[in-house]
Image: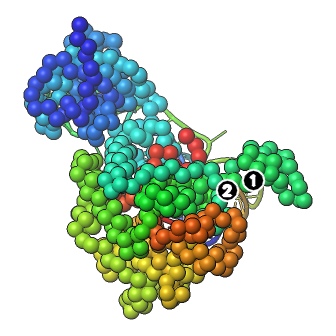
RNA sequence: UCCGGAGUGGCUCAAUGGUAGAGCAAUCGGCUGUUAACCGAUUUGUUACAGGUUCGAGUCCUGUCUCCGGAGCCA
């Protein structure tokens, strides 16, 4: 007895010749009935955006049992013959010999219709939206990008490092951590009118990580080049199309890299991933280009073909001041660049990604290396058209005394970070790194406007359903 | 968090303070190797929630909630 195996629709569609006894399994996207005595089913199994057309003859033995159940959303197993299609729109199709219904989808209740839905509505049915063309494509591209990230770093000898999810250190500043506790929050232990965290699970106040960078530095200072790729949490009340409370971040950290090396790696990295997506997700990318953003592929190719513009913060301020543009927020050296300023640089001035570096010391975190001028730090942001900041990175301060002084200046408790400081005390070395918001990358590559639509289950303020 | 907009059949949206409607979907029928099929008919409502003004509120006012867009924070 031969064991008949299900073939993926992606593989079946690539066939050039007719073949008996194929098995396909998947969900019905649409059905068109012909009173000529057969139905056309569009079957999708997620292996590709493309459906395979299945012809179900109403004279089939099984038809009486299944006819009522062949509706949009139902899940089926089809056995039949793969044939060349006489109709337009597909080269092959399956002439069904037997149809098994795994699961019905009552048309009165099933919310996905064979028409366009708003992304807003689809967010309310996060458990069913992966069965749409758009979300299938997004998650396939997301998956390919994740794979590409590992591939990129492994080709370069980076070590994939797992940094902790629960931490007691706060890398960027207070007020943005999700607290982790096993204390009874309705009746916490009190000592001197404050909560006594010595009785908490870890014996101190802990939270979910906002970045694996500091821990990443620890291992870069031993293994040379490492990267992290994992979930990150920010309890900021951000309500924008570019922020999530839980998102995935990629953070490479490299010993012996200065800021120039860092920028070079960032550019190479972005280009590698764009090329990868275009090469391996052709059908999905074409779909985005057709339905989401007609200039997408052209724009990505342009990014691939051009070198990123590298300008200092001071140069950027100069350009903005001389631009003649009327900005809502004034441009002034020492202030953060506003979204509108970044957009001018990437979309109007250079029309490609721009790396701005050497930012004023006062507006950047304590761990960034201070330049000789004493006023700027070795920080860099990669800005891309439409989206803005996709990467933020820096060369790290490697001088023990300077780092100590900066922590003091910024009001950071050096005792808490003694281990971080000791990296500079024992065998310090120049090193650099950056962070890439994975969902922002997926947005950039797919053209999707809202970050809530490029992660399977988005977490945002007031939203943790599913 | 701030500014602006929105919340009405399953979905997308209409409705000058005066009888809540259309398209799509669904259902039924017709037609067809069909392709977001097509044609005809039918069904579907606590107008987000709580108050208030008014003879009368989907519409005006107050509060609350949620969503969307923009800003800040950032990745």
Q: Earlier in the sequence, mark 2 or mark 1?
A: 2
The residue at the point 54 percent across, 87 percent down is A374
Q: Is residue A92 left or right of residue B41?
A: left
Quarter residue A238 falls in = bottom right
Q: Identify the image quadrant of the C terminus of chain A.
A: top right
The image position of residue A356, as x and y in percent, is: 41, 78
Q: Is residue A98 left or right of residue A256?
A: left
Q: Identify the image quadrant of the N terminus of chain A.
A: top left
The image position of residue A156, as x and y in percent, is: 33, 56
Q: Are marks 2 and 1 in contact (CB under 8 Å)?
A: yes
Q: Nearer the viewer, residue B66 or A83?
A: A83
The residue most toward the top is A1
Q: What label does residue A204 carry, if any?
A: 1
**Element class at badge 2:** loop
User: Disc 2 sits on a residue from what chain?
Assistant: A
The residue at the point 33 percent across, 12 percent down is A65
Per the model, the C-alpha gap separating discs 2 and 1 is 8 Å
The image position of residue A258, as x and y in percent, is: 41, 73
Q: What label does residue A168 carry, if any?
A: 2
**Element class at badge 1:** loop
Q: Is residue B19 left or right of residue B25?
A: right
The residue at the point 34 percent across, 61 percent down is A269
Q: Nearer the viewer, residue A341 or A69?
A: A341
């Amino acid at each position: 007895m031969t064991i008949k195996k299900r073939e993926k629709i992606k593989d079946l569609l690539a066939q050039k010749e007719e073949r008996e006894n194929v098995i396909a399994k998947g969900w019905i996207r649409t059905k068109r009935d012909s009173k000529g005595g057969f139905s056309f089913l569009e079957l999708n199994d997620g292996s590709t955006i493309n459906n395979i057309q299945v012809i179900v003859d109403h004279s089939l033995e099984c038809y009486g049992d299944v006819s009522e159940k062949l509706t949009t959303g139902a899940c089926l197993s089809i056995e039949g013959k793969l044939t060349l299609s006489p109709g337009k729109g597909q080269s092959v199709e399956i002439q069904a010999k037997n149809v098994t219904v795994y699961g019905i989808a009552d048309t009165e209740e099933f919310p996905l219709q064979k028409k366009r839905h708003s992304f807003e509505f689809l967010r309310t049915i996060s458990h069913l939206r992966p069965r749409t063309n758009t979300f299938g494509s997004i998650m396939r591209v997301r998956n390919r990008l994740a794979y590409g990230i590992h591939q990129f770093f492994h080709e370069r000898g980076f070590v994939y490092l797992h940094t902790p999810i629960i931490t007691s250190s706060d890398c960027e500043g207070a007020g943005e951590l999700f607290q982790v506790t096993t204390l009874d929050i309705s009746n916490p232990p009190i000592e001197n009118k404050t909560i006594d965290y010595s009785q908490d699970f870890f014996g101190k106040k802990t939270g979910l990580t906002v970045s694996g960078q500091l821990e990443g530095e620890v291992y870069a200072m031993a293994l040379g080049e490492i990267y992290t790729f994992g979930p990150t949490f920010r309890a900021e009340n951000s309500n924008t199309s570019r922020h999530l409370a839980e998102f995935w971040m990629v953070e490479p950290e490299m010993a012996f890299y200065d800021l120039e090396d860092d920028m070079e790696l960032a550019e190479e990295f972005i280009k590698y991933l764009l090329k990868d997506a275009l090469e391996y997700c052709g059908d999905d990318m074409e779909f985005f280009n057709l339905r989401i953003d007609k200039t997408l592929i052209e724009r990505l190719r342009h990014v691939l073909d051009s070198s990123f513009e590298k300008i200092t913060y001071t140069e950027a301020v100069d350009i903005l001041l001389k631009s003649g543009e009327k900005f809502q927020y004034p441009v002034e050296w020492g202030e953060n660049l506003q979204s509108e300023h970044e957009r001018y640089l990437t979309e109007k001035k250079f029309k490609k990604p721009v790396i701005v570096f050497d930012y004023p010391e006062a507006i950047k975190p304590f761990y960034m290396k201070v330049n000789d001028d004493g006023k700027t730090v070795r920080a860099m942001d990669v800005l891309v058209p439409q989206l803005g900041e996709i990467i933020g990175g820096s060369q790290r301060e490697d001088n023990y005394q300077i780092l100590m002084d900066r922590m003091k200046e910024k009001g950071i408790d050096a005792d808490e970070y003694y281990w971080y400081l000791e990296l500079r005390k024992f065998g310090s070395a120049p090193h650099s790194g950056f962070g890439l918001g994975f969902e922002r990358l997926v947005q950039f590559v797919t053209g999707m406007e809202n970050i809530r639509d490029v992660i399977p289950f988005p977490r945002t303020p007031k939203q943790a359903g599913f």
